[in-house]
Amino acid sequence: MKIEILISEAVITPSAIAAHPEVGALAEFTGTVRGSENDQPIAALVYEAYQPMAETVMRRLLTELSTEHPCIAVRVQHRVGIIRVGETAIHIAVLAKHRAPAFALLTAFMDRLKQDVPIWKTDTVS
Amino acid sequence: MTILYFAQARRITGLPQETIAVTGPLSTYDLWDMLINRHPELATLRGSSRLARNDEFIPSDATLSPDDEIAIIPPVSGG
């Protein structure tokens, strides 16, 4: 499975993932910043990453998960720094032959990311 | 030994990293004791944080070497 990971302060603009003749499904997830945190209105969240480890762990998780949910390619973009309400914090695109492994990989990866990938919401901006 | 601090750990210590003098192998328990001695408020993270070395989480029974670079990983909240 081809894996692309990008952690950056740049605004996430999901670009077209490379076409592949075997692809029959493209599953995407976009995580955005909500306008409240702990029931308090906020203007932005601040994200921080231990970038080398975050990339290594994401790659390891995706490789592990691809044995159970075989997919063709996945791209993960995670933004760090100040991310304003409504802006994208994470975007994931998964290409597979069929929809089931694409959805399954996406869901399982998000669950594992929230347990094991060293990225933090460190602060709120009101 | 080099210690890397992230998120709440960095906020508590006020440091992104520091070098501590270690003369020989030590346990993760010894390391936490040393770090809390330097930064008492780190005790609040001891139960919930993990340690990492070479981009991998390490088990609590691992042995650490003086030339290791150890990251303190508070509970993560990405995505």
Image: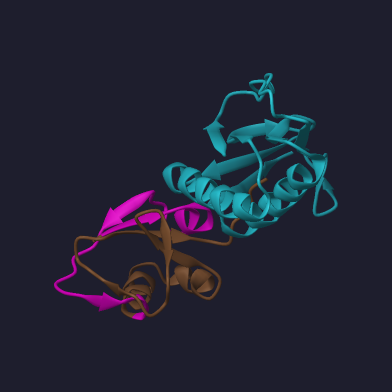
Examine the rendered structure and indicate whether residue B2 appears above or below residue A24: below
Chain B hue?
brown
Kindly indicate which chain is depicted in cyan in the rendered structure: A
In percent of the image, x 52 and y 69: which residue is there? B45
Residue B16 lies in the magenta stretch: yes
Residue A61 % position (x, y): 56, 52
**Residue A10 quadrant:** top right
Q: Does residue A53 appear to the left or right of A102 in the view shown?
A: left
| Residue at the right extreme of this rendering | A39
Examine the rendered structure and indicate whether residue A76 appears above or below residue B13: above
| Residue at the left extreme of this rendering | B23
Q: Does residue B24 appear to the left or right of B63 in the view shown?
A: left
Quadrant containing the N terminus of chain A in the rendered view:
top right
In percent of the image, x 48 and y 67: which residue is there? B50
Q: Nearer the viewer, residue A125 or A119?
A: A119
Q: Nearer the viewer, residue A64 or A112?
A: A64
Quadrant containing the C terminus of chain A in the rendered view:
top right
In percent of the image, x 46 and y 68: which residue is there? B42
From which residue to which does the magenta span run?
A: B2-29
Residue A59 % position (x, y): 51, 45
Residue A99 % position (x, y): 81, 40
**Residue B22 quadrant:** bottom left
Examine the rendered structure and indicate whether residue A80 appears above or below residue B18: above
Q: Does residue A55 appear to the left or right of A87 in the view shown?
A: left
| Residue at the front extreme of this rendering | A22
